[in-house]
Amino acid sequence: MELQKNKDLLRELPKVDQIIKNPAIDKLLDTYPRTLVVEAVRNSIDSIRKGILNGQFYQIDKMQEMVIQGVVDLLEKETRPNLRKVINATGVVLHTNLGRALLSKSARKAVDAVTSSFCNLEINLESGKRGSRYEPVEELITRLTGAEAALVVNNNASAVLLALGTLAKGKEVIVSRGQLVEIGGSFRIPEVMEQSGAILVEVGATNKTHPWDYRNGISENTALLLHVHTSNYRIVGFTRETTVEELVAIGKEGNIPVMSDLGSGFLVELSQFGLPKEPSVQETVAAGADVITFSGDKLLGGPQAGIIVGKRHWIEKMKKNPLTRAVRINKFTVAALEATLREYLDEQGVLKNIPTLRMLTEPTEEIRSRARELEKKLRMLLKVKVDIEVIGGTSQVGGGSMPTAEMATYILACVPENLSVDELAVNLRMSEPAVVARVQDGKYQVDLRTVQFEEIDMLATVMAKVLNSGEVSRR
Ligand SMILES: *Cc1c(COP(=O)(O)O)cnc(C)c1O
């Protein structure tokens, strides 16, 4: 009996040709290439066939309509870019998984300008001769940091690799045991050291490394004293860290250069906004470090890049290293970085114009008003019962920066009745645009610190859509 019913259904299954003639499908051909449409029709019919074979029941007169809806869904899914917009509702300002820093308006405009036409990437327009792609940013970097010279490479990991390989290949580098950092994505100081050809000499203990530990570690084969900013963890309690300044004094005794990997270098003092006091790039330059490296897309708020500043002698040596060519930056980066750095020339404007700095220094009152706005819009759109409230919470800096910093924030907390909180989180990650938030204390928590004002309407709409439908997403 059951089998007979399945056979009947299979016989009634629409044919590819028949579906293609349907005006609804014909219309799709205006938007999508024919091959994609035909493939989607075939796949949509196939998926219903599989359903029937699995014993699912379909109404015969609805089957054609279902195939067509399947085609629309498949085409939408398939032509959607894999890398796409996400609303960051995690409150983590520098979220490595969500692309770290947002670019300023000026940086986005600059990228557009140099990619939609030819540009003077490597030509000196005055002389007509070959120029350097680093020139547009070098002068700005040295001006802003007080360093003698600068170089920019693909990211900070490659900056560290290049610096170690140039200054200390085949020679010893002294590092404190408290600073053998691992950054996400398998960047570990001992391993990068090995890759660069330098020899790691560990000194001190995890919690305490004194200046005399470094002195005792020095041999005739020592090429570098390395200080690594413990950017993503803190050693607290009974501790002693030897500062860059102290290392510079030790280095001078034996004519040994000092390098500082700052990780998340910043140019604007953030402690005035309640964030922890950490050494800025300018302070590290002033302390006398020979080479300093930091990321372009962490606290600086620019594109992915590894910025190297320091003494001219060492920077020139790095420029001649063939590895520099292998890790060089492209024109998007030069354009975005130049525009980002120009923002820093306006000390007041920079806090508003660089999105990372704006999010880190925004008064909580403004975050609360966005939370209230989202709450109001969402309540208007909801057709089902959802427990919603605006609550206080804390956001994080992220991106392996200032790990102990806690910034007061406002959160829209949601507990739906028709879905579990985890199902809500999945559905919103799979929605268009995708939303990534936190699930904490049994609540779906939308931290408004990282949600832009322009995103509120979109966020309310997509949240309401998911909550109202109450469906568990098909994946
Ligand atoms: C983040 C970080 C790096 C790696 O920088 P990327 O720009 O991600 O390559 C290296 N060292 C430290 C201390 C860091 O914090």
Image: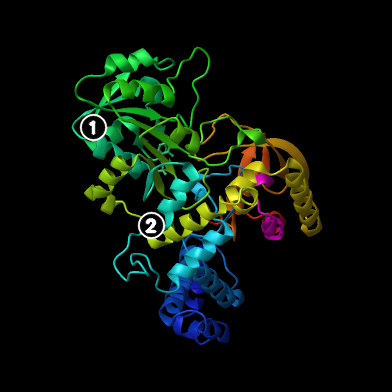
Colour basis: rainbow
Q: Is residue 416 above or below residue 5?
A: above
**Nearer the observer, disc 2 or disc 1?**
2
Mark 1 crowdedness (10 Å alpha carbons): few <14, some 14-19, many ≥20: many
Q: Give the range drawn in magenta.
A: 448-464
Q: Distance between the residues labelled 2 and 1?
A: 30 Å
35 or 178: nearer the eye? 178
Residue 177 image point, x, y percent: 36, 20
- Percent across and percent down for residue 375 are 78, 50
Secondary structure beneath disc 2? Answer: helix
Between discs 2 and 1, the one toward the N terminus: 2
On the rendering, which quadrant does ligand 1 occupy? top left
What amino acid is labelled 2 in the image?
Glu
- Specify the amino acid type for callout 1: Ala
Task: Give the residue at x 32% y 24%.
Answer: 251
**Dot 2 crowding, Cα within 10 Å, few <14, some 14–19, many 20+:** some
Q: Name the residue under label 1.
A: 198
> How far from the left and from the top, in percent, is residue 64?
56, 77
Q: Mark 2 points at which residue?
A: 135
